[in-house]
Image (tube, rainbow, N blue to C red):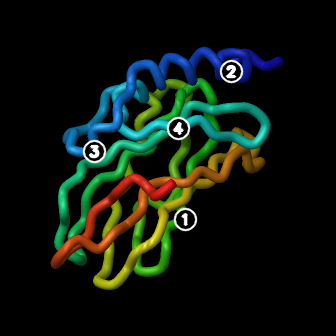
Amino acid sequence: MRPATAALPLAAVLVLAACGSDAGTSGAPARPADCNHVSLQGKDAAAAVGFHWTGETHAYGASTTLWFCVDPRLGGSITFEPPAGVTVTPQSQQNSASGSGVLPFTITVQQGATGRVRVQAADGNGRPQANIGGPEVEAAGDGWKLAEPAR
């Protein structure tokens, strides 16, 4: 078993124990444990992954930051797959082992766009590791907001 894989269950427990679901939290998290929307998902083993966003409503065409949170020791890359009418930039980032594990992305939503943002996580060799469901883009009055998907 590789060291990063062996540490995965412990990392999952630590991240979940430290996270809440306060969608109104603003500002950049310093580490994955500070993210406000965390889940356990993965193809071969559970992986502590999550997102961080504010619960604010934004005007259509306006941008905000959506953070992806993952243990940096896992490495690899993260690629966003937004629904039609939603732009995420950059679309892809490396998860550097020397980084914080909190990757900022800018999300912009055009009027009428809704749907769930998804993320593909790949290992250091580019092999897919997980398809992760992220927040839902919802219409909110004269704008849009990110929300927890309906279960």
Q: In front here: 107 or 57?
A: 57
Residue drawn at point x = 63 percent, y = 47 percent: 121
Q: Which residue is mark 2?
A: 4
Nearer the camera: disc 4 or disc 1:
4
Task: Mark 3 and mark 2 in contact? Answer it, CB < 8 Å.
Answer: no
Q: Which residue is mark 4?
A: 39
Q: In front here: 20 or 119?
A: 20
First along the sequence among labels 4 and 2: 2
Residue drawn at point x = 36 percent, y = 34 percent: 35
Residue 78 is situated, as x and y percent measured from the top left of the image, at 56, 49
Helix, strand, or loop for circle 2?
Answer: helix
70 displayed left or right of 122: left
Find the distance from the CA under tag 1 to the CA under tag 2.
Answer: 26 Å
Residue 88 is situated, as x and y percent measured from the top left of the image, at 42, 64
First along the sequence among labels 3 and 1: 3
Residue drawn at point x = 19 percent, y = 66 percent: 58
Q: Which residue is mark 1?
A: 81
**Callout 4 crowding tier (Cα within 10 Å): few <14, some 14–19, many ≥20:** some
First along the sequence among labels 3 and 4: 3
Task: Mark 4 and mark 1 in contact? Answer it, CB < 8 Å.
Answer: no
Helix, strand, or loop for circle 3?
Answer: loop
Q: Which residue is mark 3?
A: 23
